Amino acid sequence: MELLKEWGFQALALDDLVARLASADPTPSRHVVLTFDDGCGCFRREAAAVLLELGFTASVFVPVGHIGLTAAWDTPKQACCERLLSWAEIEELSRAGFSFYPHGLTHRRLVELAEEELGRELRDPHSALEARLGKPAQVFCYPYGEASSKVRAAVRSAGYRAACGLEIGLNRRAGHLWDLRRMLVLRTTTLRGFRARATGAFSYYAGIRRFIRGGGRRPNGG
């Protein structure tokens, strides 16, 4: 985060990005949207203070049915052992300027669900977050980054304005609204790799990889 500040970046609110894409307004340069999945307690303990000190906002996607519990959807080997954020902590962070959006109700694979279960995974967390925080929660994040045409249509019907996936790249047009692209930053990401993500160079590299995997179809550079 200190490097982003040093490089002259500002954090754009996710709602602002969605509004700009929907209205075809250009996204200002040197702006990033910072997102965190799952709502682990370490966001409050380690990340929030750093972000606030540097003047950055961020958006957190939470599986509403697991708030205050643990990441029970993971295998024991993968599981985040610590407790997830509680409602009280989410309310505190929301007052501090962070945004919270649904990551499903129980973090299930939406592509495997029947229509009734799918609707519950989308509608219940949406209404719960808005009622508790008194703020719109109209951007969804697909658990595991998995979506299909059926899932995307259900997300729209549930009242969302956009949704995030795990496709690598930049968001430059309204066509990305239902599968917003992101740059995954892992604990193994080097500073060189982080800079490539921040500047967009990594997006070009990912486009080349998609081009190769797609059998020579022209990569989508947006």
Image (spheres, rainbow, N blue to C red):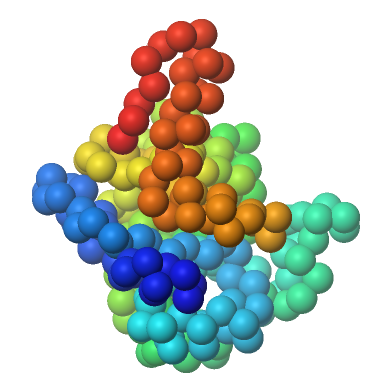
What is the x, y in percent for residue 60? 48, 68
Point out the residue furthest to the top here. 215
Q: Quadrant of residue 68?
A: bottom right
Task: Please give left or right for residue 175 compared with residue 113 in the image.
Answer: left
Q: Is residue 61 above or below residue 158?
A: below
Q: Is residue 158 above or below residue 212?
A: below
Q: How many marks?
A: 0
What is the x, y in percent for residue 200? 39, 46
Task: Please give left or right for residue 50 compared with residue 172 in the image.
Answer: right
Task: Please give left or right for residue 139 compared with residue 172 in the image.
Answer: right
Q: Nearer the viewer, residue 154 or 142?
A: 142
Q: Does residue 141 show up?
A: no
Question: At 37% across and 66% down in the image, what residue appears?
Answer: 7
Question: At 33% across and 67% down in the image, what residue appears?
Answer: 9
Question: At 58% across and 59% down in the image, what residue appears?
Answer: 191
What is the x, y in percent for residue 24? 13, 45
What is the x, y in percent for residue 22? 18, 48
Question: At 44% across and 89% down in the image, what residue appears?
Answer: 53
Q: Nearer the viewer, residue 124 or 201?
A: 201
Q: Quadrant of residue 155?
A: top left
Q: Quadrant of residue 6?
A: bottom left
Quarter that holds the C terminus: top left
Task: Please give left or right for residue 38 compared with residue 54 in the image.
Answer: right
Q: Does residue 95 show up?
A: yes
